[in-house]
Image: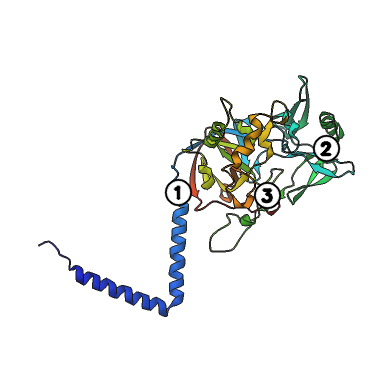
Amino acid sequence: MAPSWDLEQFFEGTDEFLENSVKYLVRNPLVALAILIIIHLGIYFLLRTQPPSLHKFNDLKISEIYVYPIKSLRGAQVSEAVATKDGFDYDRRFMLLKVNDDGIYQNMQVSRIPEMCRFLTSITLPSEDSKDSGSINVEFTAPGSSKTNSITIPLEPDTTTLPTLEVDLYTSKTQAYKMPSHINAWFTTCFTYPVVLAYLGPHRRSVLFTDLQPTKSFLPPFSPFTKTPQIGFADCAPFLLISSTSVADVSSRLPGALQMDPTKFRPNIILSGAESAWEEDYWSRIDISGTILHTSHNCGRCASLNVDYNTGKYGTGPEGTVLKLLQKDRRIDIGTKYSPVFGRYSFWDEGNGGERRLRVGDTARVTRFNVKPTVFSWKALQKM
């Protein structure tokens, strides 16, 4: 005989159970609180490990890798690079400083000095026998000129006799070395005002995002770090990731056949394969062939997007409108509310160990998504 259900009896039993449960929780508020916390954490972690419904869970690939040996000069495209907690080897280990009339050093960045884009760089990696054999080749063509000047700089200079100076980037300070006079003289001639080249050496800057500082809290949000992350002369993070799908969206906003140059976003890694533009806004953790990066913050954009690489000046045509085009709908981060967002600042997972080699063609998969958009929390940059 098939089993049967007495629905009236079932619902009476359910009502009695719920009534008794409510009475018990009223008498034991700590138990009620514990249950609410468990439910909250369960929902939080479920959402963190599942993609939002508006995104497709696609496999991605590294399509391009860039290393910028000298901050704000053009980068070197490479097929592979050694990644560490500080970023790619040789990325932004040098930086140019303007020497003001009072002798104070002023940071030089392409957003304020657009002619910096006229400097091209390439890297010769050191041989296995000698680290001294590595070098950076810098070529400069002045705006309106066809003549190219070049200089070769040691990739890892001997700092024994070099004087030190202090570099302050967004209130995160570090010591650095002032490169020899003949190198500074070459850059001074190119810029037509006094300039020095600073070398980072073994020094590092502290990352000052407030939510990425080590924490002992057992409630979210959690910091993935047991120590404050360190970086070189990169603005905020050891890695900057962008999506080629989002680059294509920017290109679609430009007239005619004009295409957005992705290098103007100054990425370290370009990922292809995202189903739709701006999926990366919700990325939280990404696995690139076994190497874990925490995509922790948005990158707020500045006037460097409007620089015309052909002239070394701010663009006067459509190329000079990119920042404005993005401001229409990409001011999505209340922590940097005046700047449109493009790309994700990313950090090394401590479980990766000392170093990993990333290559063009490596597969990548987003393994954690944010429940809601992240909020930029580097206080000195929030005011800009």
Judged from this view, the residue extending furthest toward the right is 102
Residue kind at label 3, given as amino acid type: Gln
Locate the N terminus by quadrant.
Answer: bottom left
Alpha-carbon span between mark 3 and mark 2? 24 Å
Q: Which residue is mark 1?
A: 52
Q: Could you give the CA–CA distance between mark 1 and mark 2, rounded to whole angstroms?
A: 48 Å
Quarter occupied by residue 239: top right
Q: Earlier in the sequence, mark 1 or mark 2?
A: 1
* Kind of residue at badge 2: Val
Labels 1 and 3: the sequence-earlier one: 1
What residue is disc 3 on? 230
Image position, residue 242 (x, y; %): 57, 39
Does residue 192 show up?
yes
Q: Residues within 10 Å of mark 1 (few under 14, many from 20)?
A: some
Task: In the rendered view, tell whether residue 168 sits above or below residue 109.
Answer: below
Give the crowd class for mark 2: few <14, some 14-19, many >=20 residues within 10 Å.
Answer: many
What residue occupies the far bottom of the structure in this picture?
27
Q: Nearer the viewer, residue 18 or 3?
A: 18
Which is more foreground, mark 1 or mark 2? 1
- The numbered dot on residue 196 is 2
Pair 1/3: label in front:
1
- Identify the residue at the far left of this view: 1
Q: Secondary structure at mark 2?
A: strand
Q: At x 71% / y 52%, what residue is drawn? A: 380
